Image (spheres, rainbow, N blue to C red):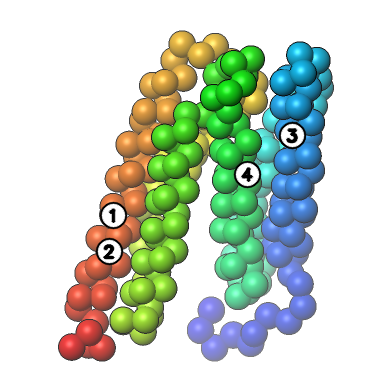
């Protein structure tokens, strides 16, 4: 809130975010061991289900740290950085590990084009952020419903693969998620271009 003193120490919301970040390496290790077993023909489904549970828990608690920060009036600069970082680390690690076209036993799996689209979009947004900040002096990020829905669909796609659910309708989910991911990326780039163009510093 305006005029509020800066938050000192690590808040409860930040502790929740840190717990989510700490769980990500555990998720990665479990999934790697499962994939190695799958490659050798000796998969351990328990490892996959543990990875599924950790991913679901970290994804489901995405809104918890934000709610705690607002409810307790403990919004901090550290929390604003760590919260989206936790989401991106979770999503990107899962996408990269589950993009396995050379592992036929992993069915379904994340298509290469989908992972490339998500990673490219995030890289363009980050690069655009710093470019607009350099040109305009500050950046106002307006959340888009397309971006929020795309993130939810990305998480559903990862959970779908981890559960090894029926692959018949999986391409439809991936197609819709990919379209919204691309649309959200274009919207964010458009917003950034407008801010840079209309900035007094841009001349």
Q: Which mark is residue 191?
A: 2
From the image, tell me which residue sits under label 1.
Answer: 187
Mark 1 burial class by Cα count in 10 Å: few <14, some 14-19, many 20+:
some
Residue 11 to residue 148: above or below: below
Tags 2 and 3 touching, CB below 8 Å: no
Q: Which mark is residue 15?
A: none
Is residue 53 in sight in this rendering?
Answer: no
Q: Nearer the viewer, mark 3 or mark 1?
A: 3
Cα distance, mark 3 to mark 4?
11 Å
Q: Position of residue 20 (x, y in %)?
A: 72, 51
In this view, the residue in front, 26 or 67, is 26
Cα distance, mark 1 to mark 4?
25 Å
Q: Quadrant of residue 183?
A: top left
Cα distance, mark 3 to mark 1?
35 Å
Q: Disc 3 or 1, which lies upstream in sequence? A: 3
Q: Position of residue 151 (x, y in %)?
A: 48, 43
Q: Quadrant of the C terminus?
A: bottom left
Q: Nearer the viewer, mark 2 or mark 3?
A: 3
Q: Is residue 157 left or right of residue 130?
A: right
Cα distance, mark 1 to mark 2?
6 Å
Residue 137 to residue 63: above or below: below
Q: Disc 2 or 3, which lies upstream in sequence? A: 3
Q: Disc 1 or 4, which lies upstream in sequence? A: 4
From the image, tell me which residue sits under label 4.
Answer: 93
């Amino acid at each position: 809130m305006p005029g509020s003193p800066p938050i000192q120490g690590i808040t409860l919301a930040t502790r929740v975010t840190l717990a989510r970040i700490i769980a990500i390496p555990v998720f990665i290790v479990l999934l790697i061991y499962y994939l190695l077993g799958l490659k050798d023909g000796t998969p351990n489904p328990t490892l996959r289900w543990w990875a599924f549970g950790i991913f679901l828990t970290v994804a489901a608690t995405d809104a918890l740290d934000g709610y705690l920060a607002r409810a307790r009036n403990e919004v901090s600069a550290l929390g604003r950085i760590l919260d989206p970082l936790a989401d991106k680390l979770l999503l990107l690690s899962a996408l990269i590990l589950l993009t396995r076209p050379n592992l036929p036993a992993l069915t379904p799996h994340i298509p290469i084009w989908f992972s490339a689209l998500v990673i490219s979009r995030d890289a363009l947004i980050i690069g655009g952020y710093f470019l607009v900040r350099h040109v305009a002096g500050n950046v106002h990020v307006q959340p888009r419903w397309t971006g929020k829905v795309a993130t939810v669909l990305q998480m559903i796609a990862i959970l779908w693969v981890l559960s090894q659910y029926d692959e018949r309708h999986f391409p439809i989910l991936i197609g819709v998620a990919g379209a919204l991911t691309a649309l959200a990326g274009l919207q964010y780039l458009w917003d950034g271009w407008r801010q840079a163009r209309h900035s007094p510093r841009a001349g």
